[in-house]
Amino acid sequence: MDIRQLRYFLAVIDHGGVRRAADHLFVAQPSLTQSIRRLEAELGTALFIRQGRGLVLSPSGAALVDPARTVVRAMEVARETVTAVEGLRGGRLRIVSMPSQVVSPLTGLLSEFAARHPHVDVAVAAAERPDDVRDALHRGVAEIGVVASAGGADSLADLHRVPLESQSFVLVAGDDAALPPGEGALAPAELQGLRLVAGQPGTGSRRVADAIVAATDCRIAVEIEHREGLLPLVRSGVGVAVVADSWGALAEAAGLRVRRLAVEERLDVALVWRHERLSPSAAAFIGLADAEPGPGRA
């Protein structure tokens, strides 16, 4: 058994099949298949069971996943630790973030990190909910997660945590939207007759949108999973959108109106990571974030 076999095994799991895994790894599909078969022969058991046109993990394969991730991650950390003896002159930082938190605070943190460590490559994966961030960390997709939750998330209790900021919510609208006059914060009951563009259930912005619908005659006209589509839809006149205040500057730059919402719902934003040895790049990023004063920090 070698580290390459374990990488190939995990790639098949993470990418949903041999073909996609081979494409991701830039290797020929037959080579990957042969590597998995050799691993199965060494272990004396099948790791996958063919089901229709796809593969599912066998009980033995499922038992191998966590140890394989531990071994692969330990090798990566060992390699980067040696490389970083004389400073961070290379390495790869892997982060998983919820969408709105990429806008803020992650963009600012990455800008500062890149200025200090220009030779470190950074990869940012997407996750819609706190549980998705946790899952990505446990699967080894990333070392660090950027998560936003309302009053904390029980499912993240097993992770280390560094608070970053607290975010409120704003309403983003086009010039033709029938909003109450003034510039002050809007209570949900003040909004009438609006078409809302809303994110998917389970998100903070969706809970605020649902509260507006419950208190008024507003309705959700469009539900969209792709948050990057929210501002274009508002600009096109489809409706107004509830977003985290981190989107405010982008919305104003796009020529949209931004009004604060008088709601109790807030998002506590934090960095999270597993209880394990971090790569030098990840440790440096967390150290930077922990030293930043950031808005809303306790």
Image (cartoon, grey):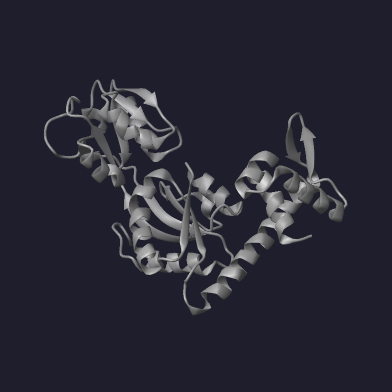
Q: Residue furthest front?
A: 28
Percent coordinates x, y for residue 72 in the rendering: 66, 60
Residue in the foreground of this view, choosing between 98 and 264: 98
Residue in the image at 55% along x and 66% along y: 278
Q: Is residue 224 above or below residue 3?
A: above
Residue in the image at 70% along x and 41% along y: 18
Name the image quarter holding residue 80. bottom right
Work out which quarter of the rendered image holds the C terminus and state it: bottom left
Q: Is residue 179 above or below residue 28?
A: above
Residue 97 shown left or right of residue 18 in the figure: left
Residue in the foreground of this view, choosing between 88 and 248: 88
Residue in the image at 61% along x and 64% along y: 76
Percent coordinates x, y for residue 207 in the rendering: 38, 35
Q: Is residue 252 above or below residue 173?
A: below
Q: In the rendered image, is residue 16 in sight?
A: no
Residue in the foreground of this view, choosing between 71 and 28: 28
Percent coordinates x, y for residue 93 in the rendering: 49, 60
Percent coordinates x, y for residue 26 in the rendering: 62, 48
Residue in the foreground of this view, choosing between 184 and 106: 106
Residue 101 shown left or right of residue 282 in the figure: left
Q: Residue furthest bottom?
A: 86
Work out which quarter of the rendered image holds the N terminus and state it: bottom right
Residue 289 shown left or right of residue 67 in the figure: left
Residue in the image at 85% along x and 54% along y: 43
Q: Residue furthest right?
A: 44
Name the image quarter holding residue 169. top left
Q: In the rendered image, is residue 7 in sight?
A: yes
Q: Residue furthest left?
A: 182
Residue 178 shown left or right of residue 272 in the figure: left
